[in-house]
Amino acid sequence: MSYSITEPSNRQKWIAGGLVIAYAILTLLPLAWIIATGFKTPADAIAYPPKVLFTPSLEGYVNLFTSRSRVTPEDLAALGPPTTWYDEIVRQYGMVITGASRYGERFLNSVIIGFGSTFLSVFLGTIAAYAFSRFKVPLKDDLLFFILSTRMMPPIAVAIPIFLMYRQLGLSDTHLGMILLYTAVNLSLSVWLLKGFIDEIPIEYEEAALIDGYTRFQAFYKVVLPQAATGIASTAIFCLIFAWNEYAFAVLLTSGTAQTAPPFIPTIIGAGGKDWPAVAAGATLFLLPIMVFTILLRKHLLRGITFGAVRK
Amino acid sequence: MAQIVIKNLRKEFGAFTAVQSSSFTIEDGEFFMLLGPSGCGKTTTLRMIAGLELPTAGEIYIDGAEVSQKPASQRDIAFVFQMFALYPHMNVRKNISYPLVSQGMKRDQVRAKVNEVAEILGITSILEKPVGGLSGGDRQRVALGRAIVRDPACFLMDEPLGALDAEFREHMALELRALHDRMRATTVYVTHDQLEAMQMGDKIVVMNHGVVEQFGRPQEIYDWPATTFVARFIGSPAMNLLNFDGMVGNGSAEVTLSDAPIKIPPMISGASGPLTLGVRPEHIRLDDSAPLKARIKAAEYLGTTQIITLDTPHGPVKARIASDQPATIGDTTGLAFDARSITLFDSTGHALISEANQKVLSHG
């Protein structure tokens, strides 16, 4: 069997383009829905048929970031005119702002735990992958298989042992505990991905550096790392996406100080009626960091995602 | 500038022995070729001289100092890799500067030195370019630049022309040799190409299966191979090897193949049993009156000469004769050998010492 590469015909291009657009609409529609809902009033959010055109409102975002309390109309009148635009929104419903909500700290927890575990997974993954790639490690194949085997069942299958272990060790509901947990889950992926990338870097570069008078570590740091940047960036994205979106362990192991945004967002619903715009606003903001991170690294990601299959 | 002495060098990879007790000396300023087929241990030997592999046993002296267990960076050598190994994330200037930066040389000094090297190699115009877009030849020049910029004690090159196109290889080979003649630095060069080795080398070591088969000047190796392996490996077409049963002793000057007497250089050592007679294609004449008969099987026209393949009772023979000499396929003719250039090999494949090859083979 032989294949030749020919320029696709115009019709083929149209069909391919159509499919891509259809798929893009399919995946982007829920996202558009969530973003739009975040800017609706609660009434618009549950309107039937759904409102496509609506007057945007920041109510969802105000509710997301504040905690509020209902007061009697007399008390409200006694407070005098609202001083800020968000006061004004809240008072339409006969409420006053009593303080900031927990969303900010939960979001910050997500950032600390997500980026912390990503950094740790990629850092440990890189040095482990380098060792596996370059040195004669005893039982190398068995060790690599063992590392891979930690991925062979869904992590949540070991939720109960981890829950008990964390309670004993005092790691429950701590940042360190969550960082370690996500690192443990991501490490096998990062070692395997990065080993592939480092294997692709010819060893001659390091040998040249060794002869040019650099130490092994300098050769690694100055020659291998820049070469592996693509692989490191794409590995980091994979690790971050997992740690950022992880829900089940976060529900199970965190409740207060170290709670991340995913388990927190659903709890907004319960606070005073079904506040869908606030939930949607929380989800929208939660998407942003991953989006920014991915866009920043997208050049690397596109190249990296081929897993170094094509020689540069 | 340095002399390199290799003494009983040995390298094992687990159960596999890559290099078996090699010994040879590379004189100061020599262009020295390590020649052999792939897997013969030539690259391993080079890497041990470089310090990229540590020997299992044996010693390496560079300029009198034993370095076999020292790291590469302390040996004052430069290495040119087959795939060039230019740092892809740096431009040409940075690549060439790199070894100097590691020594902590001052920036303007580095700059001057790099400019000087670029001048020698004719790459001044591409100094600021990234290495990614360079042609094979330019990459090769940059790799050489990175090697010579440091004025090392010696250069080690691992098939540096292997990645180039055939036509360009020729050109680079000349350039490399000219560069060497100008700098006069000891150079150790690994290749599997016997023509390249003959063309460029002052001295050649021929290796096979981790063993040094022969060590000498190109012409010595070509004329007086020490083993049947060298006889087959060097020359195109290779030396003819005719197997026969016979006996030679000290002073013998004749052997008999299929009842035909053949003159050989007077022997100093002797042997009996299965022997091999080696003769270069250009030392064979087609002569109907010669007693050793052969049938012409094929003729390849090469311009001024032609290669005639003949069948003999002792195996096929190739003869290089003038192209205007008639040779009809299917005809039977006689083979006459130039008696002065015949080598006899014993049953183990080692050359027997004669008055002709005595000088060449006794020093190795």
Image: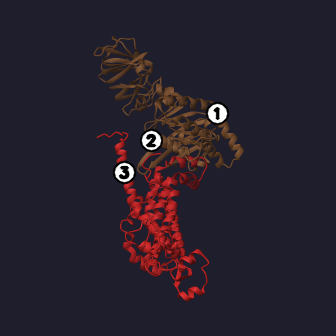
Amino acid carrying label 2: it is Gly
Chain for numbered disc 1 = B
Per the model, the C-alpha gap separating discs 2 and 3 is 62 Å
What color is chain A drawn in? red
Q: Are marks 2 and 1 on the same chain?
A: yes
User: Which of B120/A228 is in front?
Assistant: A228
Compute the Cα span from label 2 to label 1. 37 Å
Q: Nearer the viewer, mark 2 or mark 3?
A: 3
Q: Which coloring applies here?
A: by chain
The chain that appears brown in the image is: B
Q: Say which residue label 1 marks.
A: B120
Is residue B144 shown above or below A121?
Answer: above
Residue A176 placed where, x, y %? 52, 74
Task: Quickly name the residue at label 3.
Answer: A18
Residue A24 visible: yes
Crowdedness of circle 2 by 10 Å Cα count: few (<14), some, many (20+)? many
Tell which subunit mark 2 falls on. Answer: B
Q: Amino acid at mark 3?
A: Gly
Check the picture and name the quadrant holding the N terminus of chain A.
Answer: top left
Q: Nearer the viewer, residue A128 or A273?
A: A273
Check contact, mark 3 vs mark 1: CB within 8 A.
no
Query: Is disc 3 in the same subunit as disc 1?
Result: no
- Circle 2 is placed at which residue position? B210
